Structure formats: structure tokens, C-alpha cells
């Protein structure tokens, strides 16, 4: 048997990750780890800890081990096969929530999220805008499963998830939306190899690869969205830091007005939006 402190010292270069994993395995908070370092742990816990830490060293995202990630004040369940929600995406969500509150002020409206992942965008909107009916679509099984787990976790009834390829998931539903939003795959295919090892080796490529120039999904969604958006409806995207002009040009070419760019806390382009004429 070994102590908590002995396990922590074994991975000094990953001390925070070690503490978080021990908290998960022992079902305690961080203060316990620091206060009771002399406590012994079972061989089962030790073996699991070492297994997880060796994977951390290889770049495996800790969020997949902990099975959770905080986003917009909510603790989302996660697993392999969905993107880890990023703080940058909160810029899009915060804008949409503010837009709904100011423009619609408690009215019943319909909102669509394309490419739901863990449900971070869809469920955050549904949670903070109770009068909104949110629809989310994804082509993969795992995101649909994970998003529904989070839907139940947050006890939300104003959100619906559908599986399918972009708008084909909505065939037969005869829906028009006040807002369509998406954080689509936007990394150029040849640049995926240059991403952080945690992303390129372990997060789902299908949620990253935006084609040769990274803009495929912006072109497809923008063109098709006009059939599904109400007049003056909002189309809003998360984008890569260097895609502001390119995505804006796509919206303008497709006839959208009031096209604008939002920047992140580093002053980099992060969101593009426009309204259907």
C-alpha cells in the first residue's frame, strides 16, 4: 500500500492533474488530498491512478478521465467522442443569451444548434432561456448520447436532439428558426497535424476537420440555413482566430446583413454573425 503523498510525488510534473484524479478516485475534495497526505490507498486505487497518469503524460485529456467539464456555470458530463468545451465558446453563448433577452424578452422562439458535441451550447441556452425551444443536431451517435445525458442531468425539457447530416436531421419536421448557431469543424485539414497533442490525437477528428481551407461547413450551413431561418433570423458561428474576414465574406455573399465579428479576451476574432434579409 502507498500513501496519497507518495502517489502525488511520483508525478510532480503533473501535480494538479494528480490531485484532480485522486479526488475523483477517492471521492473527496482537494482539501482532503492536501490535509491527509499520509493516508494509505488501496492497490486498486493506486493501479487506477497510475494508469490514468500514464495516459495524461501521453496527452490524453484529463476531462475524459474526470468525465466532466465546467461550461457556463454548468458541470457537463463528457466522454471520448465529443469535443471538450472551451471557454472561448462561451462568447457565442453569452451573445445569444443576451440577444434573446433583448430582442424576444420572454417570447417563445425556436433555436437550432448544429453539431452539438456534449450539448454545451444547446443546453446552456436552454438552461438560461427557459422560454426558448432548442433543437440540436449531430451526425454522430456519441454526441447525441452524451448531450441527452446532460439534458437529463440538468432536468431540461425545452431541448430536443436529432441525429443526421446537417439539416437533413430535420427532414419532415417543418421547422423555421429565429436563431441558428454552430461551432462547426473549422481546422484546415493539413493543419490538424500541428494542433496540440491532446486535441489532434484524442479529440474526434470529425469535429475538427473543416476541409482544405477550414471553411467547408461555413459554406454549407450558410447556404442551407436560408431555408430554415425566419426573416431577420440570426445566424451565428464560432470561428478560428484567423477566419473572421473569410466567414464574414461567406455570409455577405449569401445575402446576410448586419454581418459582424466578436473578439475574444485576447482580442482575436472568435464569433461571426449576421441576419437573414
Image (cartoon, rainbow, N blue to C red):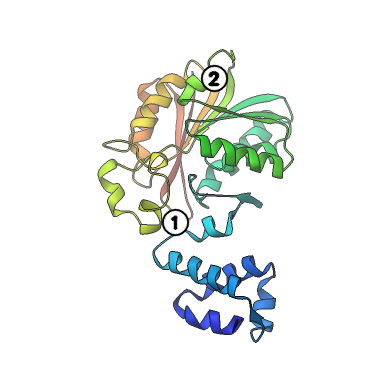
Left or right: residue 25 versus residue 220 is right
> Which residue was labeled with disc 1?
266
Of the 4 image quadrants, the one containing the N terminus is: bottom right
The residue at which mark 2 appears reads as 170
Disc 2 to disc 1, C-alpha distance = 37 Å
Q: Are marks 2 and 1 in contact (CB under 8 Å)?
A: no
Instruction: Give above or below for 195 relative to 47.
Output: above
Residue drawn where x is 33% and y is 54% of the image:
195
Left or right of 196 on screen, residue 11: right
Q: x, y (%) of residue 163? A: 53, 27
Q: Nearer the viewer, residue 237 or 262?
A: 237
Q: Residue at x 57, y 68 (%)?
A: 21
Question: Secondary structure under badge 2?
Answer: helix
Dot 1 alpha-carbon crowd within 10 angstroms: few under 14, some 14 to 19, many 20 or more: few
| Local secondary structure at mark 1 | loop
Which numbered disc, 2 or 1, marks the residue that appears first in the sequence?
A: 2
Pick the residue in front: 168 or 239.
Answer: 168
Judge the density around disc 2: few (<14), some (14-19), many (≥20) Cα neighbours within 10 Å: some
Residues 260 and 97: in front is 97
Identify the residue at image location x=51%, y=61%: 62
Report the residue at 49% width, 44% height from top: 82
Amino acid at each position: 500500500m502507498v500513501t496519497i503523498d507518495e502517489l502525488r510525488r511520483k508525478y510532480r510534473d503533473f501535480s494538479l492533474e494528480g490531485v484532480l484524479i485522486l479526488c475523483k478516485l477517492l471521492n473527496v475534495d482537494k482539501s482532503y488530498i492536501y490535509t491527509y497526505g499520509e493516508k494509505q490507498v488501496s492497490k486498486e486505487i493506486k493501479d487506477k491512478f497510475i494508469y490514468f497518469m500514464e495516459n495524461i503524460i501521453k496527452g490524453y485529456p484529463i476531462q475524459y478521465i474526470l468525465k466532466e467539464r465546467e461550461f457556463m456555470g454548468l458541470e457537463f458530463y463528457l466522454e471520448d467522442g465529443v469535443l471538450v468545451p472551451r471557454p472561448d465558446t462561451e462568447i457565442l453563448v453569452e451573445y445569444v443569451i443576451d440577444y434573446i433577452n433583448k430582442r424576444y424578452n420572454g417570447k417563445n422562439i425556436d433555436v437550432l444548434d448544429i453539431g452539438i458535441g456534449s450539448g454545451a451550447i444547446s443546453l446552456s441556452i436552454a438552461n438560461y432561456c427557459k422560454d426558448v425551444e432548442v433543437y440540436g443536431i449531430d451526425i454522430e451517435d456519441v454526441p447525441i448520447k452524451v448531450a441527452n445525458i446532460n439534458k437529463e442531468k440538468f432536468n431540461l425539457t425545452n431541448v430536443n436532439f436529432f441525429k443526421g447530416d446537417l439539416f437533413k436531421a430535420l427532414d419532415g419536421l417543418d421547422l423555421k428558426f429565429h436563431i441558428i448557431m454552430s461551432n462547426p469543424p473549422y481546422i484546415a485539414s493539413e493543419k490538424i497535424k500541428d494542433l496540440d497533442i491532446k486535441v489532434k490525437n484524442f479529440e474526434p477528428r470529425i469535429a475538427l476537420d473543416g476541409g482544405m481551407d477550414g471553411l467547408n461547413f461555413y459554406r454549407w450551413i450558410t447556404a442551407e440555413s436560408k431555408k430554415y431561418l425566419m426573416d431577420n433570423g440570426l445566424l451565428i458561428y464560432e470561428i478560428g482566430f484567423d477566419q473572421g474576414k473569410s466567414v464574414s465574406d461567406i455570409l455577405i455573399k449569401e445575402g446576410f446583413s448586419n454581418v459582424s465579428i466578436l473578439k475574444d479576451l485576447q482580442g482575436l476574432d472568435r464569433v461571426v454573425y449576421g441576419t437573414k434579409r
